[in-house]
Image (tube, rainbow, N blue to C red):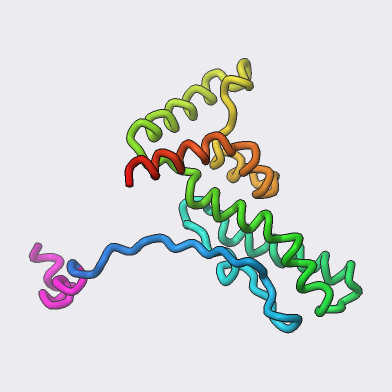
Amino acid sequence: SPSLAKLMSLETATALAEKPVSRVVTVKCDRMQVKSRSLLIGDAAHAVSPSVGQGCNASLQDVQVFDQCLNRCADNWAEALPTFSTERLPDVHALRELSDYAFPRSKWMAFEFIFRLMLKKKLGRWLPRLTKPLPMEFLMEGEHPYAEILEETRGWVERVKSSINRAT
């Protein structure tokens, strides 16, 4: 397009078109401390897909939980760091799994996802058992630990995983 030609050279446009499509990378750590000196929090310990909208929330939760650990351990970092890892890892691992499997990847599951959201909007107040929340609904509330959300929505997450495995 002539209007875009003013903004970008042909060489730059060609280089951009040839770049590989980026993929979302998630991170899973087996601990969040390095010995008793360093702490990993936020994306360094649990980078997740931006589609779940929890990167900043999870990072702030890390700080809050670590502050609580420091208080309980009387500011003893050598004790607080492994305590933090032990306490925080279940939620961090759950968030990663939710990030990877909260959204449907198949056409039929996408249809079901939309249908369930519409059904809940129309009938949720009267038939709450029929309209069990999807992971994203829990995540948007922001009131539940990630491990609890994963447990509550395990059926959906397993179905998404299964649909991915069948497609590959």
Magenta segment's dominant SS is helix
Who is closer to the viewer here, 165 or 157? 165
Q: Residue furthest bottom?
A: 37
Say which residue appears at 57% left-offset and 71% top-offset: 44
Extent of the magenta region: 1-16
Report if residue 2 lies within the magenta region. Answer: yes
What residue appears at the point 65 percent right and 47 percent down from the top-left corner? Answer: 142
Q: Is 55 located above or below residue 147 in the figure?
A: below
Q: In this view, does 154 lie to the left or right of 72?
A: left
Which quarter of the rendered picture does the N terminus lie within?
Answer: bottom left
Q: Where is residue 99 in the image (x, y as percent from the top left)?
A: 51, 52
Q: In which quarter of the image is residue 103?
A: top left
Q: Residue at x 44, y 40 (%)?
A: 162
Q: Where is residue 59 in the image (x, y as percent from the top left)?
A: 63, 64
Residue 8 in picture, x, y percent from top left: 17, 74
- Who's the residue at 56% across and 60% down the image? 55
Horizontal relation, residue 138 to residue 9: left or right:
right
